[in-house]
Amino acid sequence: MINITIKQLRYFEALAHHGHFGRAADACAISQPALSMQIKELEDTLGSPLFERASRQVRLTNFGEGFSSRVHEILRSVDELGDFARASQHRLVGRLRIGVIPTIAPYLLPDIMSKLSRSHEGLDIHIRESTTTTLIQELTDGRLDTAILALPVYEPSLTEVSLFDEEFVLIRPGEDEDKPVPDREMLRHMRLLLLEEGHCFRDQALSFCNMQAALPREVLDASSLSTLVQMVAAGIGVTLIPEMSVAIETRSAEVSVARFDKPRPTRTIGMIWRKTSPLATQLMQIAEEVRLTANREDRSHSHKTTAA
């Protein structure tokens, strides 16, 4: 009988993911020699090498590729056993892995984390900030328990729960404050600054303006809303940002903030998790707490945005 430990499988998965012994060891919170020894013991037990070792990185062998897919399913099942045990306690304790997209994380997470820490003693929250595509993949793979992002995600294996709707606002240079607010047709002919490819907020902004992402545009593609707002302050163009970000992103920028005439661009923020998750009941409770926290935060900042 082959003696393989769950710990070895987790070390294997970390090394397969990072492709580097040092980074994998850091992720596993162990020393690099200890990780190397565990991987070597695993390979000896299996009787076949799992990795090709180069000077700066490691790659899976053909055998390692096949082994990896099976390891992933095993570890996901082990995690779900742990979730099943946690769900039986009727309260959420232990580790909770939450994914959040970048256009939400800086603005809602502080209040949400504070609320959940107070209401769920013993809950160890781990945050993963990334784009929608990455979060959905990691959630599907079992590396996350839930994610907060813009809906819909069109993934049949996931439960979607709407939390609240949010408007987009127009950010213009400060000297444009008294000018009429452009409609979507006018925006098509302006230098519209957007987030780089991969951010769902970019696609939502383009959709509102009836613009195709593939069309060539004289534009800056930024990695953050903060960069977009600062570029507007420098007179380079205009941009759209979600209302929740206004108070933070405009406090140190000489820009004007305005609402569009109806129909105004909006997005729906929600939580998603696997339909098979044993924590579904607890995650629904978490979603309600996030909804209430977000709504209170929205009301406290709503006066900061001026209507057009």
Image (spheres, rainbow, N blue to C red):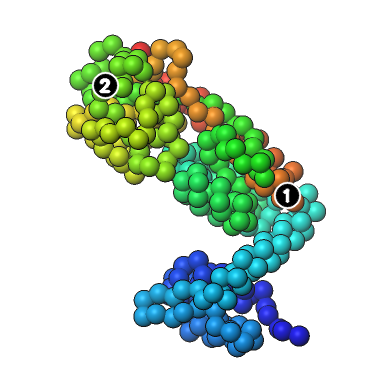
Dot 1: element: loop
Indicate the amino acid at tag 2.
His
Q: Is residue 70 above or below residue 265?
A: below
Residue at the limit of the structure toward the front, as seen here: 62
**Where does the image place residue 272, in percent across and percent down from the top left?**
62, 42
Q: Is residue 148 above or below residue 45?
A: above
> In this orientation, which residue lies closer to the viewer: 215 or 30?
215
Indicate the amino acid at tag 1.
Thr
- Residue at screen point 37% across, 30% down: 212
Q: Is residue 180 above or below residue 102?
A: above
**Where does the image place residue 131, in percent across and percent down from the top left?**
46, 46
- Residue at screen point 46% across, 49% down: 130
- Residue at screen point 46% across, 67% down: 18
| Label 1 CA crowd tier, 10 Å (few <14, some 14–19, many 20+) | few
> In this orientation, which residue lies closer to the viewer: 66 or 149?
66
Image quadrant in which you'd find residue 275: top right
Can you identify the residue that label 1 sits on? 276
Q: Measure the C-alpha gap from mark 2 to mark 1.
A: 47 Å
Can you identify the residue that label 2 sits on? 189
Can residue 107 be seen at all in this image of the molecule?
no
* The N terminus, quarter of image: bottom right
- Numbered disc in front, either 2 or 1: 2
**Where does the image place residue 207, in percent across and percent down from the top left?**
43, 26
Can residue 1 be seen at all in this image of the molecule?
yes
> In this orientation, which residue lies closer to the viewer: 197 or 27?
197
Dot 2: element: loop
| Label 2 CA crowd tier, 10 Å (few <14, some 14–19, many 20+) | few
Q: Is residue 10 above or below residue 282?
A: below
